[in-house]
Amino acid sequence: MTVQWRERVRPDWVDYNGHLSEAYYVLVFGRATDAVMDAIGLDESYRERTDASLFTVEAHVRYLAQVTEGELVEVASSIIGVGKKALRIWHEMSCEGTVRASEEILALHVDTTSERSVPFPIDVAGAAEALRVAPPDGAGRQISLTP
């Protein structure tokens, strides 16, 4: 199952090359992560009530095709791994039905007071597990140079 996020590319997000600047890919993917958090119960009220949140500790972005000003970006997000204290989330950014970028993140559930990772509550872990899908092609890749 996927969680959807949509947003139109703003003029100030476009760089000197005429396309979406890399910082704004991460901004949009971050908003998509927030939508995943909301979907599994890590929403604003949870964060205020528990002083716990999800922190991204690793990310891998692939820029597959350009995104330009005014385009509607749609991010489909899936949970591809659930651990006691961690989630692996896969985002695919599309415009007009074509995948333009992907991001894979590893995120930890953190007590913001102690700044230490803590286990997910049972209901959150269950909601995350219910949304988990098999990792897609491209997940788990590493950067390398091939001769």
Image (spheres, rainbow, N blue to C red):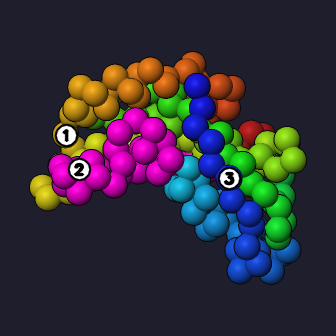
Q: Residues within 10 Å of mark 3 (few under 14, many from 20)?
A: some
Whether 129 is among the magenta residues is no
Q: Residues within 10 Å of mark 1 (few under 14, many from 20)?
A: some
Task: Check disc 1 and report the residue beneath it.
Answer: 118
Q: How far apart are marks 3 and 2 (CA)?
A: 26 Å
Q: Which callout, 1 or 3, points to the residue nearer the camera?
A: 3
Q: Which callout, 3 or 2, points to the residue nearer the camera?
A: 3
Q: Where is residue 96 in the image (x, y as percent from the top left)?
A: 87, 47
Disc 1 + disc 2, Cβ < 8 Å: yes
Q: In which quarter of the image is the N terminus?
A: top right
Which label is found at residue 28?
A: none
Amino acid tagged 2: Ala
**Which circle's residue, 1 or 2, is located before the other in the chain?**
2
Position above or below: 16 against 31: below
Would residue 83 be found to the left or right of residue 118 on screen?
Answer: right
Position above or below: 21 against 89: below
Task: Check disc 3 and report the residue beneath it.
Answer: 6
Task: Check disc 2 and report the residue beneath it.
Answer: 52
Q: How far apart are marks 1 and 3 (CA)?
A: 31 Å
Whether 41 is among the magenta residues is yes
> Regarding mark 2 in the picture, which secondary structure is present there?
strand
Please provide the residue range marked out in magenta: 33-62
Q: Residue at x 34, y 23 (%)?
A: 126
Q: Quadrant of the C terminus?
A: top right
